[in-house]
Image (cartoon, grey):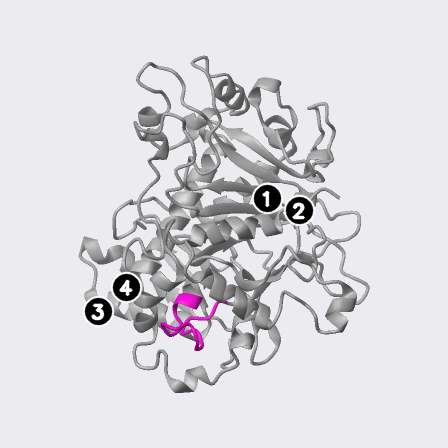
Amino acid sequence: MQCTCAPHPRVDLAPAYATERGGDAAALALCRRHVRAACASHGCFHATLPLPDARPAHEGATSFACLAERRVGDAVESLFAPAFLDGAVGRRSEDAAAKMDPSDTSDGDGCSDWEAICNGGRREVPFPIECLPGDENCAKDEDGARKPAVTATFRGRIAESGDEKDPAPEPKLSWEFRRCLAAGNALQTTAGGGDIAAANARCEGGCDSPWGLLPDWTNALHSVASTIVHLLRIRPLLALQENRCQCLERSDNESNECQKCNIDLLRVFRYDALPPSANGDPALGSSAHSDWGTLTVVWQDDKGGLQTHCRACDRWSDVEAGSDDGRDSNTINLFVHVGDFLSLASMGEGGDGVPAWPSPRHRVLCPTADQNDGQNADNCRRSLVYFAYPPPGVSLDAARRFVAPLACPTSANTGAERSVDSAAVYDCYSLLHDQSQQPTPMEKENGLDNTKGSASLRLHERIRGVAFDKVISDKWSQVQRKPT
């Protein structure tokens, strides 16, 4: 077991974006080696991208201007500002059809104030389709009728649960936006466009409003994940859906039902600033976990708080935060880590060894603040987190046949690897913990914790041949908070 403590590796991705514009092939090869080495040593790394000319070196070119560090923090805050939340989430008319989670405890008269919204549950909010890229191609059908709006999901504090060890609500707010525009997002509407009209009424300023940020960030961070998959030489459409979503444009999609072209997800977080605990430790904003998918791409502000865990040393290490001070204003600073799917796929083909690319366990600490100053916007932590998944229909076994020899061509599936404690290896993955079955204190004390040990190994055997989007659907049902 190797040490994965800080400092975390750093990789300059500039050569990957310069290749098709006459870049240095030797620099690209070195970049490729650095990415592979970082995935092998830590399962995570700092990634830097150049501005203002950063472009992906493959299909789906995206501008990264929306990730310029000096702009993102204020832009994130605008999505949680009282005026925007009250308009987008709180004041819903009946025809807006915003669906509210049963666990939402805010006022039921549709006139919630900001605190009630923040302390409430999950709400599906119509997303103005005019704010989507390519609106001229998909906003209306052939008869001139409005197509359905998609939705963004707002989660108040009681909708943010901890991991399998601590199911208590976590002190943060979030927005979610799905890269597949039809993936659970479509809302039926009439030619009069009632839903969209209600949604657009909230979109003051048109596409320059906060709504327009969500697809921009999604496209930019997805392109980073795509670039890394290319650098790892993973076969297209095996670990990541590269193609853009066209579900709402398809002529055969008359019902506008979910086509599930991908399950990628952007989450925008705002962590509360809280006083330290009695022993002086900062409050947990996100409990310890590993991510389920292929890759996770993170932008975080200068508050920091993200930490990774080293199993060899049993120690938490800070991930260096972004900062305006001393940074190149023409550089984007991100943090990337391997997810459970890609890590498990990097094992030997039989899945009975150790991963070539570990999936780092990580957590987030809330920033500290005085009791009376915790909700000051200047004190809160903000981040963008993009969760990249394999395309629907791809299973772990299907990916492993290609990824394992690629990740570790000389030692995959050797006898030495088979000698490891498989139960201990699989227990490192949150994907393999049944988070719907919380062990009681007595069960934990007597070693009957069903989220641990051989239970993880058994779960791996059950899901390895199953389409991963089905596995993730089950995982989401496990972690959704139920009404109390």
Front residue of 26/481: it is 481
Please tell me which of labels 1 and 4 falls first in the chain. Answer: 1
Q: Nearer the viewer, mark 4 or mark 3?
A: 4
Q: Nearer the viewer, mark 1 or mark 2?
A: 2
Please tell me which of labels 4 and 2 falls first in the chain. Answer: 4
User: In the image, what residue occupies the spot 37% across and 51% down?
Assistant: 393
Please tell me which of labels 3 and 2 falls first in the chain. Answer: 3
Left or right, 432 with respect to 130, comes to right
- Which amino acid lies under the numbered mark 4 shown in the image of this protein? Arg
Helix, strand or loop under label 2: loop
Please tell me which of labels 3 and 1 falls first in the chain. Answer: 3
Q: Which residue is mark 3?
A: 26
Left or right, 395 with respect to 243, comes to right
Q: Which residue is mark 2?
A: 481
Please tell me which of labels 1 and 2 falls first in the chain. Answer: 1
Q: Which residue is mark 1?
A: 174
The stretch drawn in magenta includes residue 103 = no
